Amino acid sequence: MLTLDQARDKSSLMRKFMQEPLFVEFADCCLSIVEPPEKE
């Protein structure tokens, strides 16, 4: 996360990181905490 935060080209680095399943799982977990899914 520190590497991503300090990168000049965050968009490009984020695309690279999103190819890693562990990073995607971490990002999904963080997003579910920040913005929980709406109940239907």
Image (cartoon, rainbow, N blue to C red):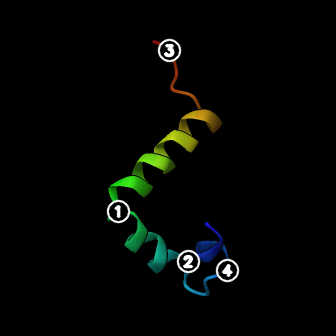
Residue that lies at the very extreme toward the top in this rendered image: 40
Contact (CB < 8 A) between labels 1 and 4? no
Query: What is the count of numbered marks?
Result: 4
Q: Is residue 21 left or right of residue 9?
A: left
Contact (CB < 8 A) between labels 4 and 3? no
Q: Residue 8: image x %, image y %?
A: 61, 87
* Residue type pointed to by label 4: Gln
Which residue is tagged 2?
10
For discs 2 and 3, the disc positioned in front in the rendered view: 2
For marks 3 and 1 on the same chain, the one whose residue lies earlier in the sequence: 1
Decide: few, some or many residues near mark 3? Use Cα within 10 Å; few <14, some 14-19, many ≥20.
Answer: few
Distance of label 2 from label 1 (alpha carbons):
16 Å
For discs 4 and 3, the disc positioned in front in the rendered view: 4
Task: Name the disc covering residue 39, or none.
Answer: 3
- Image quadrant assignment for residue 16: bottom left
Task: Name the disc covering residue 20, or none.
Answer: 1
Which residue is tagged 4?
6
For marks 4 and 3 on the same chain, the one whose residue lies earlier in the sequence: 4
- Above or below, 11 relative to 18: below
* Residue type pointed to by label 3: Lys
Contact (CB < 8 A) between labels 3 and 1? no
Q: Residue 4: image x %, image y %?
A: 59, 73
**Which quadrant of the rendered structure holds the N terminus?**
bottom right
Q: Residue 26: image x %, image y %?
A: 49, 48
Distance of label 4 from label 3 (alpha carbons):
36 Å
- Above or below, 12 relative to 2: below
* Residue type pointed to by label 1: Glu
Task: Name the disc covering residue 34, or none.
Answer: none
**Residue positioned 32% across, 65% down in the render:** 19
